[in-house]
Amino acid sequence: MKQSARHTNTVCRKAGFVKTFQKNLPLTIMALPALVVMFLFRYLPMSGLLLAFKRFSVRKGIFGSDWVAWQNFEFLFKTSDAWVITRNTILYNAFFIALDLVMAVAMAIGLSELLRKRRAKVYQTIFMAPYFLSWVVVSFMAFSLFSVDDGLFNHLLNYFGFSGVNWYAEPGKWPFILTFFQLWKTVGYSTVMYISTLTGISNDYYEAAIIDGATKWQQIRRITLPCLKPMMIVLTILAIGRIFYADFGLFFQLPRDSGPLYPVTQVIDTYVYRALKETGNVGMAAAASLYQSVVGFVLVVGANLVVRRIEPDSALF
Amino acid sequence: MKNTIKRVMALGAAAALAAGMLAGCGGNGNSTAGSTAGSGSSAGQEITTLTWYMSINPVAADTDKVIEALNEYTREKIGVEIDYKVMANPDYKEKMPNLINAGEYFDICFTSNWTTDYLQFVGKDAFMDITELLPQYAKETWDFIPEAEWNAVKVNGAIYGVPSYKEMGWQGGIVYNSDMAEAYGIDMTAVKTLEDYTQVLATVAEKSKAEGKDVVGVSGLTNAWPMAAPYESLTGNPKLPAAGAVAEFNNFADMAGQAVFNQYASEEYMNYCTTVRGWNQAGYLGGDPVNYDSDTANRDNDFNNGALFSYFIQYAPGTAESMTASSGHGVDFLPLMDPLFETRSAMGGLLAISSASEYPEKALEFINLLNTDEYVGTLIRHGIEGQHYTAVGDNQVDKTMGGTLTENGYDYTYGWQFGTPFNQKWDISYPDNIEELFQEYNDSAIISPNNGFTFDAVPVETQVAALTNVISEYAPSLETGSVDPAEYIPQFLDALNANGAEALVTEVSNQLSQFNAAG
């Protein structure tokens, strides 16, 4: 008796699965190409991560090469710069995330408050334009400002009777220069994300608030910001996941690989590049990238956990 | 079972165009079939198709025509056709290592210490050991290239590539605008050392300012230090702190008795940095020598226009003459040292055969033609006679065809990347005794005491990675006089020591004494 009940139960569940599958067949088929692509390009190449623990030989291939345990990871920690690299990578990125969030939200609100929508569109396009420039191009634009002999700034300084500054040899100035260019390049893009959320907020809220006599400031604080919050949290969690990846172009191209600036421009990506461009060790490169991925993964999960504690509705997963 | 799994995975990867990641595990047999399918039916004998990956700058427009002519010749001569895959130097540097890592099939490829690193790929088993095959299938080349070159390219006693035999070793010095030197009454013959050059720079600065011009005295300092105090680079990389003294140069007295030492800790380094610091502060180097050095197009432009007096180069015979032709003013060369031949000198360019190649014998026969056959050498460097050049006398060509040809579809100023310039004709912008000049240069070359020693960096890879970073942080600014050596050299040395400079020196000396004990 008992057995037959269990039996029917299983059959039921099976039928349920088949039914659900049949019901959702069109959706499944729609998702299939993406799933296949994802499997081929995201999951299959992961077998390459084995290289992080191997001494790579072309003839033996990825699976046949000899194991070397953790040896490939040593160069990341056995340098006297390990602390500088980690500090620079995390601090810069933390600052970028915070400033980008504040500025993008402020600009998005500002632009959406503009009454003349056409003008708002023009500004928005202008702010977004730098996002599409490559860092190499930006580095030459910066060079035309900072060049010792021909730079605009040194010409200005000379014109007003000050002596020129050797910009590419003075580390003290670069945290500000780097931050400025990073924000100049990315804030416009994040702004657009927030504007798109803003346009989705129903006007009813504002009308009701105005009838109740709310000031502009009160409207922003009580309606706009709470509505933006989910978007802010999502973008920030994603950004935190990449906190251990530095923007190579920003830290390598913009300072023009200038030695005296290393103490403030050396980040994990530039360190790995400089360390391996001579030896080209595939295993060490894989090790660095695996290390970054693992830290990023831990941070995303961690950040999401914190968010779920405080605000379960806004958590990503 | 294991094989099936591998094959299935390789198949899946190929479908995903991710073949690059996995083909190395055993799918090689398939990919070779396509590229080596002989087209031997028409000719009586079997024709072998060799895949040749080549790096040359820039890729000439008429490459296909020239290769067609080449194939016609080699088909007859050795029964070989070339599937020529040529890339410009910057592309090759990025793509070729990936192609090799991915297990792409090839027979011959260009390798060196500046692109698709020879030692690195020997270490990864990418190239074939041709020590035995060479005397058999490329006998003329084997005899023609001096023994010192063959020794230099040996790794653990085995040869994995045919070196380009050109000028032997490297000679550092300064090329200068001889018209300007004459106008300012400068006697260059009096200059023997770097310190002597200070006076020259002072004169140039003084006289040019009097004329109301702003002339930069000298550039190229980021490469100048090893020319000021030549040493043998035992790791193959002159920047890494593991140098050996060469008796003929009479330097590094403070390191006497040490077979391997850190050249940055020497008195010579301090002297060099102090000298150029003086130049920098006196304003002979322009405002920002590091950035000035990085832009060679700008440098050449300034040099041609008389805005730059001189710069440091590694010299090859005939360079001054050809620079005179291209710059529009007299150019002369001031050597700072005799040519030095060391292991790394032979690695400026090699042709290697893939360890997976199915026709290593044919590939060697073809490389032999590149090195010894005059028709092949001239064809691959200057193109087809009557189409890309006219012959002048027996040994020269005119790439302008008497001034009638302005857009030449195929001409390479430097032919050594294809093999050796000794079986190639030279353009008339070079002196007609150019081969003698090369011979003279090669005869005067000092062979370094540890020639043939190749350093295996694997045991100290971690240290090398960290040291490379330290060096690129400190060396460029010290060596261009941008910072005060008295303050920064001690910092530099501390950083080197903190990142394993001593471990590197110890490892190099261990390997070196093993090498010397064995040889």
Image: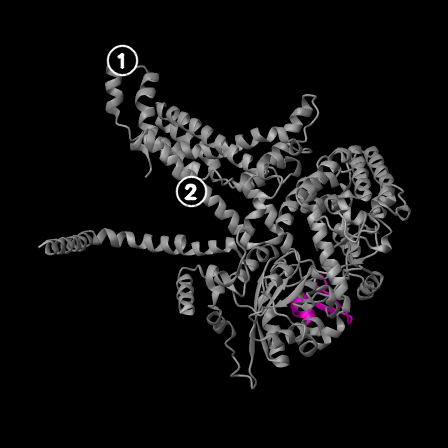
Nearer the observer, B228 or B494: B494
Residue B499: % across, % down: 66, 43
Co-location on one chain, circles 1 and 2: yes
10 Å crowding of disc 1: few (<14), some (14-19), many (20+): few
**Is residue B207 toward the left or the right of residue A185 in the image?**
right
What residue do we see at 62% from left, 52% from top? B461
Which of the labelled discs sits on residue A213, or is there none? 1
Q: Secondary structure at mark 1?
A: loop
Residue drawn where x is 23% and y is 23% of the image: A204
In the visual, does A54 lie left or right of B442? left
Q: Which residues are magenta?
A: B376-403
Check disc 1 and give the amino acid type.
Gly
Depth check: give the residue in front, B516 or B295. Answer: B516
Q: Are marks 1 and 2 in contact (CB under 8 Å)?
A: no
Residue furthest out toward the top: A213
Do we see residue B359 in this rendering?
yes
Residue A297: assigned label: 2
Could you tell me which residue is drawn at 90 percent across and 45 percent down?
B187
> Which chain's residue wears label 2?
A
How many circles with numbers are drawn on the protein? 2
Q: Percent from the top left, x then y, of residue B85?
A: 56, 65
Q: Residue B164, labelled with which disc? A: none
- Is residue B385 rendered magenta in the image? yes
- SS assignment at label 2: helix
